[in-house]
Image (cartoon, grey):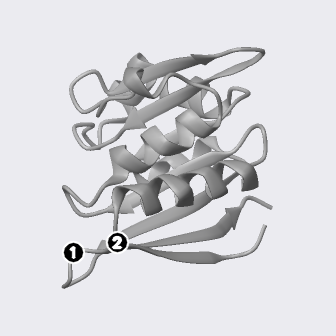
Amino acid sequence: MSARRWVCRTEEETIAAGREIARMLPADATVHLVGDLGSGKTFLVRAIAAALGADSREVASPSFAIVHEYPRPDAQPIVHIDGYRLSENRREWLEIGIPELLGAPGIKLVEWPKREFEEFEDSHVEITIRVMDDGSRQIGLDPSYTRG
């Protein structure tokens, strides 16, 4: 997988980018989504999840629940984690089961990832979303991290 960039001016273009990203992801990918509040991370997760066979109506920001799972026909569910409200307290991560979730088979989509999560992953893809002055979104995909 190589680095990619998209400039999305409409929701439809963001959905198309999500479909492309979904096609690029390995079956057990962990994806870190990085961007400011309101940049469109959850919207992109919805597009990726739909392209992977999940019901996009089920996709919501996991800020309050922290973890959501979206079933897919004939595949592992998609795990959607939001680290925004997680403290730096590792005990909380263990109680929620973050290490097991990140190490499990299937696609894991992580908003607001903590750097320490990398300890529980073999690798991850990073997606960065930037809101440009004209309101468009610049989406960058970087297959940046592989634990050696």
Q: Is residue 45 left or right of residue 25?
A: left
Q: Nearer the viewer, residue 114 or 58?
A: 58
Q: Amino acid at mark 2?
A: Arg
Q: Quadrant of the C terminus?
A: bottom right
Q: Is residue 136 left or right of residue 15?
A: left
Q: Which residue position is annotated with label 1?
A: 135
Tag 2: Cα neighbours inside 10 Å, few (<14), some, or many (≥20)?
some
Q: Quadrant of the N terminus?
A: bottom right
Q: Nearer the viewer, residue 132 or 92?
A: 132
> Earlier along the polypeptide chain: callout 2 or callout 1?
2
Disc marking residue 9? 2
Expressed as whole percent of the image width and height from the top left, the position of residue 29 reads 69, 44
Expressed as whole percent of the image width and height from the top left, the position of residue 123 reads 70, 53
* Proximity of marks 2 and 1: CB atoms separated by less than 8 Å: yes
Q: Amino acid at mark 1?
A: Gly
Tally of numbered discs: 2
Q: Residue at x 35, y 52 (%)?
A: 41
Q: Give the secondary structure at mark 1.
A: loop
